[in-house]
Image (cartoon, coloured by chain):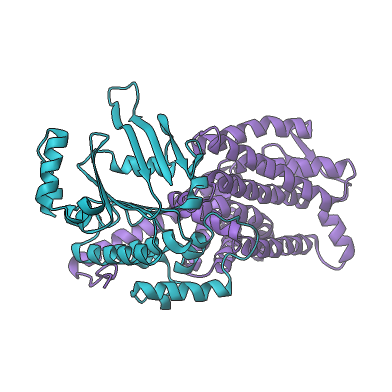
Amino acid sequence: MIKLENVCKTFNINTINEKKALNNINLSIESGDFITVIGGNGAGKSTLLNLIAGVYPCESGAITLDGSDITTEPEYKRAKFLGRVFQDPMMGTAADMGIEENLAMAFRRGKKRGLHWGISHEERTLYKEKLKTLDLGLETRLSSKVGLLSGGQRQALTLLMATLQRPKLLLLDEHTAALDPKTAKKVLELTDSIVKRDSLTTLMVTHNMKDAIRMGNRLIMMHEGRIILDIKGKDKENLQIKELLDMFESASGNTMDNDRMLLS
Amino acid sequence: MAIFQAIQDAAAQGIIWDVMALGLYITFKILNFADLTVDGSFATGGVVSAILITKGMDPFLSLLISLAAGMICGFITGFLHTKLEIPEILAGILTMLALYSINVRILGQPNMALLGVSTVLTSVSSIFPALSLKAVSALIGLIATILVITFLYWFFGTEIGCSIRATGNNEYMVRALGVNTDKTKILALTLSNGLVALSGGMVAQTQGYADVGMGIGTIMIGLASIIIGEVIMGKRFSFAYKLASVVFGSIIYRCIIALVLQLGLDSKDLKLLTSIIVAAALSVSVIKKKFNSKRSNHAPTTNKGGEAVD
């Protein structure tokens, strides 16, 4: 469905801080895939997601969606088929606007915005139903400002917003990394249930190896801007942490030295 | 009694100028954009309207042309900022400076008295001959204010208006939700400067002269109105209430100015005074915060922040 061909990205090109973030990435995401992405700091995981979302342009290579080239399409146009949740809970919602206003913005993703009233009555009923599925009691606080919510609540809301209009691809960029373990677990469960319910194609970056192994049907591991492992199907189902570490060692020639990934 | 009279005049002036403050509210508060174009576009509105009515145009129609001229000014700043990626303050200053030359060109002379021509003031006053000119001016301001507030209340409730509000709040989110933030920014700047220029046209017509320098300090007067309104009326309430507090702030600002002039302040010092008022009003919230945190050192608060997710 979405194909990346020979995609490269270098930051601060021609300066002393030049950093090759992505090096010749080839990735084909099939419809229905739930891919977990792991890798150390600076491996290029977030850059990969941002390139797909169009936050910054590719240096070279091409991105195609269902056969049509979207490499140069701006971020706001690609939003039509993308749902996104960010690492920072503040990024995905507008703090000074109400819960329903945020949902109404998300409800119109990929649609033309005109001079119709920003929220209709039928929508409110829909939002209430959807909020109920989060089980956070937000359905009684439709007009509360999002800034009053906790990080976990905001992240759950962002997840709901990202999937309110069914996205062709859901991009989750370490969306539980900034939450406490208990809240992170809850948001992750929610993610799993929404992805399964709507059978969404998903690309989820995580630092947690256990989650990466437990969730999804495909796992890719990145190292220094390259995809060094791509495990799917039966191999993925039977994958163990120990095995993954060995594979990382033989593929990258390094030992895994990232405490955050090992300990979590 | 002189003070009483001065306050009445001030209120009448405040209600004409509040349209400008409402325009500035769009960029400063809703879009979160410090737009310095207004110093130029306010004068543009004034000179455009002045030159047109001296050429015999209907004064109300000339105000619409002022509005359109201001919208063009705002569009240019928006274009400079979004498409050419010039920082917001600089983009505003560039347009403002360019407008100074353009305004002189439009008027053909540094200033112009509107004597013996038909203005909104004279036309409305001929309908209500019993009212004093001050009262007529206040009436014009009141009608314009009500129209503008109604329009803004409607517009910022629509889908496009919501996108503009969200852009001022969190542009990353808005782009991720499929809104072209360049467009929303340009639109907000266009609308804002249109209202500022409309106010400039009304001010020129009601005071009876236009001056190419009439826009100097407009942004400070607008900010003073917005902030005074916010400090006195509070921030918590609905959008309509917030717009009304801008109007209220504009009137209070004029009253403060009238009061200090009555107390013997030289009118040359007005700009200094305006700056001091804005600085003081802006610092109120900071001082409050510091004061509160000092108090909370003695008595720990029970505020636990946001609620847990489960």
Task: Determine which quarter of the picture holds residue B43.
Answer: top right
Q: Position of residue B67 (x, y in %)?
A: 73, 48
Asked if residue A24 lies left or right of residue B241, the reply is: left
Q: Looking at this view, name the residue that lies furthest to the front.
A: A234
Q: Is residue A60 above or below residue A3?
A: above
Q: Quadrant of the N terminus of chain B?
A: bottom right
Q: Is residue A138 above or below residue A255?
A: below
Q: Position of residue A248 (x, y in %)?
A: 15, 40
Residue occupying the point 64% across, 52% down:
B20
Residue occupying the point 34% across, 75% down:
A135
Along the line of sight, which residue is nearer the eye, A146 or A229?
A: A229
Say if residue A135 shows up in the picture: yes
Q: Is residue B129 above or below residue B196?
A: below
Q: How many numbered callouts? A: 0
Asked if residue B6 lies left or right of residue B59, the reply is: left
Residue occupying the point 41% across, 31% down:
A61
Along the line of sight, which residue is nearer the eye, B156 or A257?
A: A257
Along the line of sight, which residue is nearer the eye, B57 or A114?
A: A114
What shade has chain B been given? purple
Task: Determine which quarter of the picture holds residue B289.
Answer: bottom left
What shade has chain A been given? cyan
Asked if residue A186 lies left or right of residue A121, the reply is: left
Residue occupying the point 86% across, 56% down:
B122
Q: Quadrant of the C terminus of chain B?
A: bottom left
Q: Is residue B53 above or below residue A182?
A: above
Task: Determine which quarter of the picture holds residue A223.
Answer: top left
Q: Position of residue A48 (x, y in %)?
A: 34, 41
Q: Position of residue B139 (x, y in %)?
A: 75, 64
Along the line of sight, which residue is nearer the eye, A96 or B128?
A: A96
Say if residue B215 shows up in the picture: no
